[in-house]
Amino acid sequence: MTGRPLQIEVPQPLIFTLNPLYPGKLKAMYKYRYPVVRDDLVQALTAAGVDNIQYFQAVLRDTVANVDHTHYKAFNIVGVVACADMEQSELMGTSDSAMVDVDFRALVIDEKKTGGMLLFRLAESVNAIVVHEKVKKQVEASGIENMVFFGPGEWTG
């Protein structure tokens, strides 16, 4: 969440256990404490030109089927950008902060402040991952299902 490169040795593979209460088709991305993406999503991000992510080998362990899924990577986004247009965005008013944990009813990005980055964490609300339209189109063209993208003014959080 800091947007800085990890400077520690990360043991690999990182092992994550799927929740047996939520069976079904595997997702392209999971938001564990350390987020995890499937290899085809890594390929789509790379094809779009995203080059500011550290990847680490990961295993998703299915304890019900007794299967390890090894085509996943844990990741760290290098880059936090303060680019919310606070005048145009609608705030929920649930936070006293102007950075890190702002709750938006509708977020508007000032594109001039993004520095041309294609993917980054939003400094005002670091749980948000912002992607450029180019990245969204590449992910969709790659046929990756169930990825949810929000347009300008649509994201709340």
Image: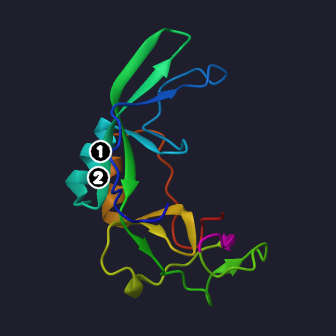
Q: Residue at x 49, y 45 (%)?
A: 34
Tag 2 secondary structure: helix
What separation in Å lies between label 1 and label 2 (alpha carbons)? 5 Å
Q: Amino acid at mark 2?
A: Leu
Please give the label number shown on residue 2.
none
Counting from the top left corner in percent of width and height, residue 11 is at 35, 36
Tag 1's secondary structure?
Answer: helix
Q: Mark 1 belongs to which amino acid?
A: Val
**Disc 2 packing (10 Å; few <14; some 14–19; many ≥20):** many
Estimate the x, y position of residue 68 in percent, counting from the top left.
40, 17
Q: Quadrant of the C terminus?
A: bottom right
Above or below residue 155? Residue 137 is above
Residue 104 appears left or right of 82 = right
Mark 1, residue position:
42
Residue at 60 percent across and 67 percent down: it is 154
Is 132 displayed left or right of 62 in the figure?
Answer: left
In which quadrant of the rendered view does residue 115 lie?
A: bottom left
Q: Nearer the viewer, residue 16 or 45?
A: 16
In the shown orientation, is residue 39 left or right of residue 29? left
Image: magenta residue range: 100-105
Residue 47 percent location from the top left of the image = 20, 52
Q: Look at mark 2 in the image and give the residue it sits on.
A: 45
Q: Residues within 10 Å of mark 1 (few under 14, many from 20)?
A: some
